[in-house]
Image (cartoon, grey):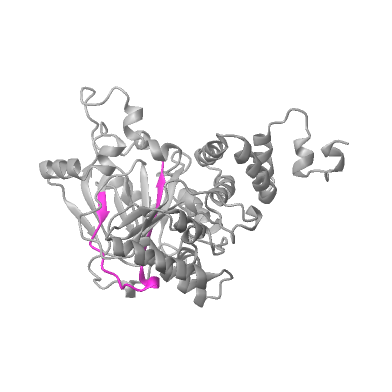
């Protein structure tokens, strides 16, 4: 008897019995039908049996984002993150079949952050063996601190203990869509006009989100164990779309931003990447200056202002200087020495934007910018959180300053603007 004969009509098995239908196509069809758990189960088989299955699924997420199908991209990314970073407790469809996390590194800053977060979740009554997880983390922190090193690969013992939770989805808070995400207290048309009529292209928006959206996003960021990125100095942690910064509310905000600014973003500049950063320690000023690979950058802050010990700082500085079009991603994003040389040559005006909760900055991603000195209270709920959404491609932005001459531009300009890591996905 064939599998199709015993499978319910419309089930994953029945779909799979269709002559010659590729398994990957079945995954995409199930997700489009809203049957993500069935799709996820099929993806487990794809990843088990096909060496490039993980890369394929990541590429499908990127393709969906390029087509502005954010809901579809979000569902695919949810499956991918669960497969890559799932734990024994989340997501349920994984059935405890966790996979090793590639290139995971313990760090003192992340261990401390995670202990604080697990203690916070324990107070919230989250259902997971948090006492034993916290004990394992404290033992790993003591060992790492005793060695006098900030980062180290996980040992076999670490994999058995902290590895069951480190960088994994132990808990993901619900963040459903709300009636309206962007606040009606500001006018998108006025923001567009200010952006287009003034140089540099920088606009500040206060009361950016509705109260309901702000509360939901803050709770999602504080309660979800999605802060996997720990390769940064000064205790900074990140969460990307591919590592868990993905929820219906997050994507609703991205959609409403796109629709609010049809002349700036609209259909021309699809969402390319989104992430959030946490500052868990004091951050010196002038230590994160860079430009981004997109056309439009939307950056907003969600931690209450009472956490900021220096109300005149903790925000952002944007410089009236664009990254040269001939520079590649590593030059304008990862080479502070080159950026400092360029800024010393041009001596650009610095636009200081102090920290305020629910304040957004809309600006040309080519402009060099960075976080000002950060000194927030050290308790867990006071960590400074900023959210970034990047729209469009640097090479397609019509708001560049006067372009460089052809003599100065590289032969392959398409390669110069693009981050190889973010062109597909950042691991």
Q: Quadrant of residue 333?
A: top left
Residue occupying image coordinates x 62% and y 56%: 96
Residue 422 % position (x, y): 41, 40
Q: What stretch is highlighted in magenta?
A: 369-392
Whether residue 371 is in magenta: the answer is yes
The quarter of the image holding the N terminus is: top right
The quarter of the image holding the C terminus is: top left
Indicate whether 381 appears above or below 206.
Answer: below
Indicate whether 116 appears above or below 264.
Answer: below
| Visible residue check, residue 384 | no
* Horizontal side of residue 406 vs 382, given as left or right: left
Residue 270 % position (x, y): 46, 42
Nearest the eye: 92 or 306: 92
Nearest the eye: 3 or 152: 152
Residue occupying image coordinates x 59% and y 70%: 127
Q: Which residue lies furthest to the front in this view?
A: 157
| Visible residue check, residue 404 | yes
Whether residue 420 is in magenta: the answer is no
């Amino acid at each position: 008897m064939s599998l199709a004969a015993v499978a319910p009509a419309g089930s994953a098995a029945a779909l799979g019995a269709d002559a010659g239908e590729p398994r990957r196509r079945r995954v995409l069809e199930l997700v489009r039908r809203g049957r993500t758990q069935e799709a996820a189960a099929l993806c487990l088989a794809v990843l088990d049996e096909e060496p490039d299955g993980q890369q394929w699924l990541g590429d499908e997420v990127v393709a969906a984002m390029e087509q502005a199908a954010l809901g579809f991209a979000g569902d695919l990314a949810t499956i991918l993150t669960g497969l890559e970073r799932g734990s024994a407790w989340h997501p349920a469809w994984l059935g405890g079949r966790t996979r090793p996390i590639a290139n995971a590194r313990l760090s003192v800053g992340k261990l401390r952050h995670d202990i604080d977060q697990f203690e916070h979740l324990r107070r919230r009554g989250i259902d997971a063996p948090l006492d034993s997880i916290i004990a394992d983390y404290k033992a790993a922190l003591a060992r790492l601190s005793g060695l006098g090193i900030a980062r180290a690969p996980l040992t076999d013992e670490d994999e058995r203990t902290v590895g069951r939770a480190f960088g994994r989805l132990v808990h993901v808070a619900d963040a459903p869509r709300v009636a309206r995400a962007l606040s009606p207290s500001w006018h998108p048309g006025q923001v567009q006009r200010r952006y287009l009529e003034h140089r540099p292209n920088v606009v500040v928006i206060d009361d950016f989100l509705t109260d309901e959206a702000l509360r939901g996003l803050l709770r999602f960021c504080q309660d979800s164990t999605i802060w996997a990125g720990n390769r940064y100095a000064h205790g900074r942690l990140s969460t990307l779309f591919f590592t868990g910064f993905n929820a219906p509310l997050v994507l609703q905000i991205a959609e409403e931003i796109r629709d609010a600014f049809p002349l700036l973003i609209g259909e021309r500049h699809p969402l390319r990447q989104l992430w959030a950063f946490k500052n868990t320690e004091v951050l010196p000023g002038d230590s994160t200056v860079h430009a981004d690979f997109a056309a439009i950058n939307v950056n907003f802050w969600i931690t209450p202002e009472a956490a900021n010990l220096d109300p005149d700082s903790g925000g952002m500085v944007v410089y009236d200087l664009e990254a040269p079009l001939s520079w590649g991603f590593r030059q304008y994003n990862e080479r502070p020495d080159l950026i400092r040389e360029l800024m010393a040559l041009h001596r650009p005006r610095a636009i200081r934007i102090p920290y305020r909760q629910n304040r957004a900055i809309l600006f040309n991603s080519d402009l060099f910018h960075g976080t000002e000195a950060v000194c927030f209270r050290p308790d867990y709920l006071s960590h400074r959180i900023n959210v970034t959404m990047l729209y469009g491609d640097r090479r397609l932005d019509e708001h560049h300053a006067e372009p460089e001459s052809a003599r100065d531009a590289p032969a392959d300009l398409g390669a110069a603007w693009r981050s190889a890591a973010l062109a597909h996905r950042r691991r």
